[in-house]
Image: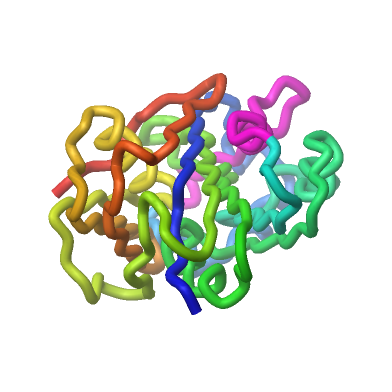
Amino acid sequence: MPDLGIDTIAFAAARREEYVPLSTLPGAADLVPPERLAAAGIPLSRLMVRIPEDDDVDVTAQVLAALGPPAVPQPLFFVRSGPLRDPNVAALAGLVHRSGWAGEDVGLTHLDELGGTAVFGLLEWAVESEATAVICDEPLFADSAGAHPRFAAVGLRVRRGTSALTVSGCGEGKPALTGDHRFTGRGPCDAWLAFCAALAEGVVADGERVLLHTRGPLREGWLSLLAVDVAAVRLVPAATASLLGGRSG
């Protein structure tokens, strides 16, 4: 089967401030898995939860709009980092309806920090010719001792055959491959946003290997890309795009 590649990347990030102490919500503590609290190192007394509001910035919809309609009908893979910020909302169904998506749609959730890296193991198996993948990170919880999280989304047009970026490998755990550039982040979109910033600044050259590395509170994952034709990568910032965070090393 031909290699899986990427030729278009759209991105958006928006800092969110509307978190309230978990202690103010009766029974809310039962919703938080104890193992995640232990791994994240957030004391229950500092735990805050996001309250959905009508004016929430929908970074996922912005990214899909920035990508534009595909030239041919294709599957949409909607990859969420964790639980819905509003359990009463069917996020994928709403996204498909609002965008008028013509192809099939597949929702993947609770991949946590590995949503932007190890998910490519599934995409390499599932994508037959062309597809769109949208990786969404909308943290439900926050630590009152730190900065409030951001909502982030990255949209990718992937296809079989010659592409501007070729997937060399992916996996869970410590990176099994090296690269000329390494971008590390805590959330599923962080390394992607740092990579987008490097592309915009002309840091990555043809023939170089790029390692996207995610090291979160529970797991670690990686994705290796070969830059075949950097000039051909279509980089599309969405309406509230912000290249915040992530680091190269």
Q: Which residue corresponds to the image point at 59% horizontal and 48% vertical from the top-left?
A: 134
Place of residue 226 in the rendered image (x, y in percent of width and height, measured from the top left) = 28, 59
Residue 115 pos. (x, y %): 50, 59
Q: Is 166 or 65 nearer to us in this picture?
A: 166
Q: Residue furthest front?
A: 162
Q: Is residue 190 visible?
A: yes
Which is nearer the eye, 27 or 142?
A: 142
Q: Is residue 147 above or below residue 33?
A: above
218 on left or right of 89: left
Q: Residue at the location (50% across, 44% down)?
A: 47
Residue 50 on the magenta span: yes
- Using the rendered view, name the quadrant where residue 75 is placed: bottom right
Whether residue 89 is visible: no
Q: How many discs mark residues in the rendered view?
A: 0
Residue at point 79%, 59% (across, down): 104
The image shows residue 181 at horizontal and vertical percentages of: 17, 51
What's the coloring here? rainbow
Residue 204 vs 110, above or below: the answer is above
Rendered image quadrant of residue 146? top left
Q: Is residue 80 left or right of residue 236?
A: right
Q: Nearer the viewer, residue 12 or 100?
A: 100
Q: Position of residue 82 (x, y in %)?
A: 60, 56
Please give left or right for residue 86 compared with residue 165 in the image: right
Q: Which residues are magenta?
A: 43-68
Task: Give yes or no for residue 157 being in the magenta stretch.
Answer: no
Identified at 46% across, 66% down, the residue is 4
Q: Is residue 149 above or below residue 18?
A: below
